[in-house]
């Protein structure tokens, strides 16, 4: 099996926010997330030869995520890095470009390849479930392209490369969903200073010294895998997809004239998340549930001061039903639809709760927390249970 005959298969999981939404968009603020056992899977197939900046097409990306089913990509004449053909760049193109910038800076020749992308992060009709498909496809692309070139990346490097790729396409995101997809399991996350990141990137020049940015300490950034609590996680989907960038932008705009209310929300969220993370680490179920309830209250306050709906009527029904069965519950992520979560103590009749959700028009999702084994330089990770998140070479 020669290198050109090899393919790379890699996957990345979706995510759910447990707490800390909206506040985590601000640098240095905390959130807790989980990776879930639905995935974006990428198969990368090298073409027969290397390619030069003059090549019209370096490969094709095939995915049901595209309206046309596929799109070609090529190399920019100025630096040989990836760009879309006839369309705007997206997360996949951006991820290819960032990883290959690292490869090119190491003096290695770039290669031509195709990508085939499949997704489990939507329902049978193609509607997204709010599980972070954009972040998962970015992380999976980073891992797959890195695997093609034999780059040994730890989880933090994968996060940083995916964050650089994502920030170039959608700069409003916190990166928490990227962290959950890269690290997996239960994750305590503190967002980096993205203004610093963009300035550092600008100083590095057009191509950007990606290797230097990956090695640098990012102000504010912290990613830590947590020991899972004994509470059982249940997830319900409202059937109403929501746009996270639009909701986050709307809440930020609506909160600008709130006086000190937004600043108070951020501080209260920090305090709430600090207590919640400590409770998770202690497996103190009562305090974990109290933290979830408190975070819900804080989000309701943010909704009032911003004038934007975070917890919809469907999400409220989900929460009230869960609470009626003894669980702690709230919206997950930006809200406005999508998913809600419930953390259930042993006494909760989960089957009855899920039946009540269905009667109220909320679809219970068959999801579990996904934890992958440790990568290099990632101490304290959970035991290995699914190594196929990492790039796997296969015969094409």
Image (spheres, rainbow, N blue to C red):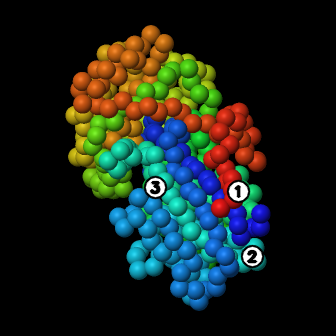
Please give the residue where the numbered disc 1 appears in the rendered image. Answer: 393
- Spatial separation of the CA atoms under disc 1 and disc 3: 24 Å
Q: Position of residue 82 (x, y in %)?
A: 56, 76
197 or 93: nearer the eye? 93
- The quadrant of the picture occupied by the N terminus is bottom right
Mark 1 Cα within 10 Å, few/some/many (few <14, many 20+)?
some
Q: Residue at x 51, y 31 (%)?
A: 368
Q: Is residue 206 visible?
A: no
Mark carried by residue 168? none
Q: Which numbered tag is attached to residue 108?
A: 2
Name the residue tied to disc 3.
134
Q: Position of residue 371 (x, y in %)?
A: 61, 36
In the displayed structure, 288 sits above or below 158; it is above
Helix, strand or loop for disc 1: strand
Residue 206: % across, % down: 58, 80
Which mark is first along the chain, 3 or 1? 3
Pick the front one: 142 or 256: 142
Tell me the quadrant of the picture where the C terminus can be found.
Answer: bottom right
């Amino acid at each position: 099996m020669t290198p050109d005959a090899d393919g790379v298969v890699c996957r990345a999981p979706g995510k759910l926010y447990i707490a800390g939404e909206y506040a985590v968009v601000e640098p240095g603020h905390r959130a807790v997330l989980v990776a879930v056992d639905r995935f974006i899977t990428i198969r990368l197939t090298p073409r027969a030869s290397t390619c030069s900046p003059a090549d019209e097409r370096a490969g094709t990306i095939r995915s049901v995520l595209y309206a046309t089913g596929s799109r070609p990509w090529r190399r920019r004449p100025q630096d040989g890095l990836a760009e879309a053909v006839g369309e705007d760049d997206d997360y996949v193109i951006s991820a290819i470009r960032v990883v290959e910038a690292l490869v090119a800076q190491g003096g290695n020749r770039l290669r031509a390849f195709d990508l085939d992308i499949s997704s489990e992060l939507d329902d049978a009709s193609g509607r997204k479930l709010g599980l972070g498909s954009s972040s998962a496809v970015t992380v999976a692309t980073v891992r797959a392209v890195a695997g093609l070139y034999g780059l040994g990346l730890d989880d933090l490097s994968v996060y940083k490369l995916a964050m650089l790729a994502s920030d170039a396409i959608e700069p409003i995101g916190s990166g928490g969903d990227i962290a959950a997809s890269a690290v997996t399991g239960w994750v305590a996350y503190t967002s980096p200073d993205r203004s610093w990141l963009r300035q550092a990137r600008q100083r590095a020049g057009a191509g950007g010294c990606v290797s230097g940015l990956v090695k640098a300490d990012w102000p504010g950034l912290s990613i830590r895998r947590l020991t899972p609590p004994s509470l059982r996680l249940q997830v319900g989907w409202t059937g109403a997809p929501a746009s996270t960038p639009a909701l986050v932008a709307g809440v930020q705009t609506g909160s600008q004239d709130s006086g000190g209310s937004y600043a108070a929300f951020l501080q209260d969220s920090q305090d709430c998340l600090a207590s919640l993370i400590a409770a998770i680490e202690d497996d103190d179920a009562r305090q974990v549930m109290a933290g979830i309830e408190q975070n819900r209250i804080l989000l309701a306050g943010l909704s009032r001061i911003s004038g934007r709906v975070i917890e919809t009527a469907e999400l409220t029904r989900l929460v009230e039903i869960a609470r009626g069965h003894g669980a702690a519950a709230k919206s997950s992520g930006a809200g406005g639809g999508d998913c809600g979560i419930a953390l259930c103590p042993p006494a909760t009749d989960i089957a009855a709760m899920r039946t009540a959700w269905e009667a109220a028009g909320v679809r219970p999702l068959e999801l579990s927390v996904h934890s992958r084994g440790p990568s290099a330089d990632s101490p304290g990770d959970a035991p290995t249970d699914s190594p196929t998140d990492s790039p796997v070479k296969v015969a094409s």
